[in-house]
Amino acid sequence: MAEAARSSGSKIEEAVFRTVLGHFASGVAVVTGPGPHGPAGFTCQSFFSLSLDPPLIAFAPSRASTSWPRIEAAGTCTINVLGESQEALARAFSRSGGDKFAGVGWTAGPTGAVRLDGALAWLDCRIDSITEGGDHLLVVARVVELASGHGEPLVFYRGGFGSFRS
């Protein structure tokens, strides 16, 4: 096993922190929302179910995101859970700038938020609260409508994309 990094009295190196946390496999989602000049969105792997009653989810956008402020201003968002064939979509939405929606099919949900065509699942939400958390924010959102399809998820593990076969 690799040498352990400790926080007592010394700073944990960012590269070590990233490597260790990279051992936690996660699904991949694109958070989307309406914007004043068209839809906005970003790739997010820090997404989780928070509460069943009421139905709440949480996700963590970077403070450096240029898409998040546009979504936040709208007060609504959709979490689009990506399927195993959507790696290119995940990569496109992870880049800053440009028209991320060029050539991407989507529809507006009841909140006005944006549902990506072909997503494995989607959750339309209203933003409830935002808390500061270092270089990211923690957003809690109330689910108002959701659905899922068939297929396998896109998975992110140790800095790369893959799939999960059940």
Image (cartoon, helix red, strand yellow):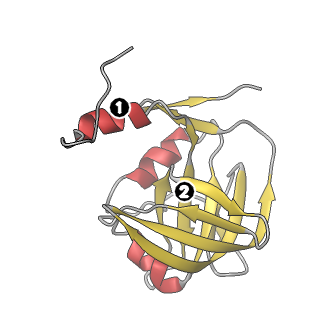
Could you tell me if the residues under marks 1 and 2 are in contact, i.e. CB atoms within 8 Å?
A: no
Can residue 56 be seen here? The reply is yes
Q: Quadrant of residue 3?
A: top left
Label 2 belongs to which residue?
30
- Asked whether, in this view, residue 38 is left or right of residue 146, the answer is left
Q: Position of residue 142 (x, y in %)?
A: 68, 75
Name the residue: 29% across, 31% down.
5
Quadrant where the N terminus is found in the figure: top left
Residue nearest the viewer, comparing 2 with 45: 2
| Numbered badge on residue 19 | 1
Q: Marks 1 and 2, how far apart in space?
A: 23 Å
Q: Give the tally of numbered discs.
A: 2
Identify residue type, mark 1. Thr
Q: Position of residue 2 (x, y in %)?
A: 34, 17
Identify residue type, mark 2. Val
Name the residue: 54% across, 73% down.
33
Query: SS for tag 1?
Result: helix
Q: Position of residue 12 (x, y in %)?
A: 24, 40
Q: Position of residue 31 (x, y in %)?
A: 54, 62
Q: Quadrant of residue 56?
A: bottom right
Quadrant where the C terminus is found in the figure: top right
Name the residue: 47% across, 30% down.
23
- Asked whether, in this view, residue 134 is left or right of residue 102, the answer is left
- Asked whether, in this view, residue 68 is left or right of residue 7, the answer is right
Residue nearest the viewer, comparing 114 with 125: 125
| Numbered badge on residue 57 | none
Q: Nearer the viewer, mark 1 or mark 2?
A: 1
